[in-house]
Image: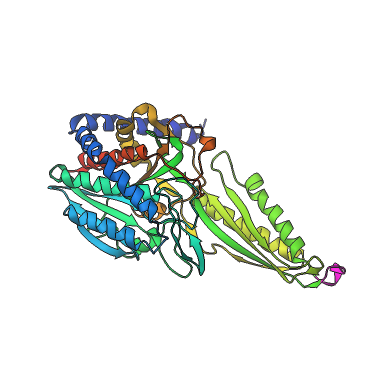
Amino acid sequence: MKIKINKSHFEYPIKTLSLFILMLFTTLAFAQFKDHSKVVNKIADKIEQKVIDWRHDIHQNPELGNREFRTAALIAKHLESLGIDVQTKVGMTGVVGILKGDKPGPVVALRADMDALPVEEKNNLPYASKVKTTYNGNETSVMHACGHDGHVAILMGVAEILSAMKTDLKGAVKFIFQPAEEGAPAGEEGGASLMIKEGVLENPQVDVIFGLHLDAFYEVGTIAYRPAGIMAGVNDMKITVKGTPAHGAYPWVGIDPIVVSAQIITSLQTIVSRNVTLTNNPAVVTIGAINGGNRSNIIPEQVEMLGTIRTFTNEDEAFVLKRIREITELTARAGGTTAMIELPYSTHFPVTYNDEKLTSLMLPTLEKTAGKENVILIPPTTGAEDFSFFAQKVPGLYFFVGATTKGRDPKTVGDHHTPQFLMDDSAFKTGVNALCNLVFDYMELNSQ
């Protein structure tokens, strides 16, 4: 008699046992090393107002991607004043600082993004932005409408604390102040991918990277995290459908690209509703713009559509992009038109992936920083982040820090990327403590 063994019966218990052993090891390891968090918190209290002042100053003087000249100069001057080795103009306007501890150990990178958005601020703040500039040939207002000003201020504060505690560092810290996270201007390279291309993770070679994002939908004092895919991979696309123009009164004379485009849009929605296994990972296929024609009685020659795709695994990304091409090309052919698909069109960010072992290893640090009851396991978010490029190269951990006033209804909070976006100044200290504690604890766990 042969017994057929189903390996899947054993996968979950084995995985659970492995995680339990890792958690047990982590607990024992944490119990044996020096805890620097009390000293970190004490210094963080002293410099809290300085961090807030930096954030106000940067908020009042926002700069778009690859144009963060003033911000970069402010950062470089501060790092140099701390005795940190500084490199400027990395990835256009990026700043990199290297702090070597007095003891050997791993190289830990910390990343903050610097750029603002082409948004007109509508907050009644004494430090509200009034800045205007030119963006892609047009005049625009500029605002830190996503929290990057806070990220810069937090990392400047972290640099001050870690430099003051240099004798306790078992390794080196690389401070990465990154431009153009929101995307470079048309025709330019920028962001994390360009910094990596220019060697930001080398000399010295980075072993691990941590990053955070202030979030207006979580209360001050909270930290939100997720192992594996925390933010979506994103592709944008452009679809051009070409038909044959005709008088609107005689549609049978031509081939209508508007009708075919409508059919393509409707059919694309079946990818998420009928093709993707939604119980495993969510996905999004959105057409955000459609342009074609200029009169009610003229059938145009072509229609252009712009859209975005969000997925949480490389496998899902490949599958969804394949289905988009199949549906678009075959629907166009069935309607007598042709379709040109540019995918990605101008943007591709991979999934922001938190290394699962690293996340498990450092979870006690996050809980120590904010209190276990304030550290929240969250579902994945369909937003995207180019921190993902760093996390493709070295193990990474990316998390959210609550930035809205305690007790405020999240429904009344201005969303990220909007003129009403707002953060509570008391949020920044949690971010400062978290990054400092992650550096010290990781070094303690991984130094020789």
Q: Relative to residue 402, is residue 236 drawn left or right?
A: right
Decide which of 59, 298 is in the foreground and name it.
59
Residue 309 placement (x, y as % from top left): 56, 53
In the rendered view, does 196 fall on the left or right side of 185?
A: left
* Relative to 245, 419 lies left or right: left
| Quadrant of the rendered image containing residue 372 | top left
Question: In front here: 363 or 278?
Answer: 363
Taking depth in this image into account, of 295 and 21 the one nearest to the observer is 295
Residue 103 visible (yes or no): yes
Identify the residue at horizontal 33%, vertical 37% (top origin).
430
Q: Write the start and end of the magenta stretch as one range.
A: 247-254
Q: Is residue 189 above or below residue 403?
A: below
**How many circles with numbers are drawn on the protein?**
0
Q: Residue 161, percent across and down? A: 21, 43
Please identify the quarter of the rendering in which residue 214 is found: top left
Outermost residue to the top: 373
Q: Quadrant for the C terminus, please.
A: top left
- Residue 145, horizontal then vertical, whole percent: 46, 50
Residue 432 vs residue 324, the one in the foreground: 432
Q: Is residue 35 magenta?
A: no
Residue 128 against residue 365 in the figure, above or below: below
Is residue 84 among the parts visible in the rendering? no
| Scheme of colours in the image | rainbow
Is the residue 135 above or below the residue 349 in the image?
below
Question: Is the residue 156 above or below the residue 408 in the image?
Answer: below
Coordinates of residue 368 in the picture (x, y in percent): 29, 31
